[in-house]
Image: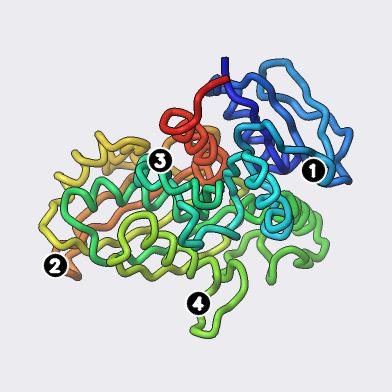
Amino acid sequence: MGYRVVVAGATGNVGREMLNILAEREFPIDELAVVASSRSTGDMVDFGETGKQYKVQNIEHFDPTGWDMALFAIGSDATKVHAPRFAAAGCVVIDNSSLYRMDPDVPLIVPEVNPDAIDGYTAKNIIANPNCSTAQMVVALKPLHDAATVKRVVVSTYQSVSGAGKEGMDELFEQSRNIFVGDRAEPKKFTKQIAFNVIPHIDSFLDDGSTKEEWKMVVETKKILDPKVKVIATCVRVPVFVGHSESVNVELQDELSAEDAQKILREAPGVMLVDKREDGGYVTPVECVGDYATFVSRVRDDATVDNGLAFWCVSDNLRKGAALNAVQIAELLGRRHLKKA
């Protein structure tokens, strides 16, 4: 016996990945519904590699009464309309948008980092999934924080175009093809050419000169890991289809050598340490695609500050950064709070 589960946004990149991961992890499902906007109504979607297909229903007309949980990947505007409706009907919403992340009545969860925070979900019947870049970083920071207390983090991200959805992936493909045949590579989704280029701009600019993506990494890390941690982020879009990378510098309260940090990270939940200090002895985005882990490489001492460390962090942003984390939240919710039918 299992749960009655809804996947909202089932035709998008993250929604499809949610279905794949639910199937891969054999999540206990009694009944599954897939919903999306009216333009996708009637489409058929695969439930992973199970051979099962489901017809997409219109979220506008879907009645969530009697359903246990809904995994949302529909963007903030649609979430603002439908999440309260689902929650009021008793269906717990696990939301992938940024809408509720900083709501004090909504827990922001990375199960390897702050599982106990999920107990606060009853205030609104909504649980938030963090930004993809934040999720992988805090998985790597958590064991270091437990061992020596993280005081300050300086992070530069190298974020794939899949973080901007199908339109971002299509633009990289089309621009690359156009450049090879001598055609113009006009930007549409992005502010500048993304093919064979990098863009230090993700989301809108704020008054202090940072972008909203950078702000998200700051405030979400504080909410998930520790409000006392100081964070500065520079978020960059790179011409990679899937997989976010991060260069992370950490200042710790207590001394922790790179060697000891490696030992800690090697045993940390959700982390895969690949750090051979030789040609190819590290993980790149291409190698992390399709994997559940947050990969950490290039762990070394940072002599520019007292008790400093630096490391390289890579993860599949459609998986750990979005869909996998949402499914892990669903598993945690089930274990701690929901009874199977």
Residue 172 appears at what percent x and percent y? 70, 54
Kind of residue at badge 3: Pro
Pick the front one: 203 or 338 = 338
Quadrant position of the C terminus in the picture: top right
Per the image, the residue denoted by label 1 is 59
Residue 310 appears at what percent x and percent y? 27, 57
At horizontal 29% and vertical 41% (from top left) the residue drawn is 275
Q: Earlier in the sequence, mark 2 or mark 3?
A: 3
At horizontal 58% and vertical 53% (from top left) the residue drawn is 160
Kind of residue at badge 2: Asp
Per the image, the residue denoted by label 3 is 111
Q: CA distance from mark 2 to mark 1?
A: 53 Å
Quadrant position of the N terminus in the picture: top right
Q: CA distance from mark 3 to mark 4?
A: 28 Å
Q: CA distance from mark 4 to mark 1?
A: 35 Å
Mark number, residue 210: 4
Mark number, residue 226: none
Front tag of 3 and 4: 3
Q: Earlier in the sequence, mark 4 or mark 1?
A: 1
Front tag of 2 and 4: 4
Q: Earlier in the sequence, mark 2 or mark 1?
A: 1
Binning the other alpha carbons within 10 Å of mark 4 as few (below 14), some (14 to 19) or many (20 upward) gives: some
Front tag of 2 and 3: 3
Kind of residue at badge 4: Ser
Q: Earlier in the sequence, mark 3 or mark 4?
A: 3
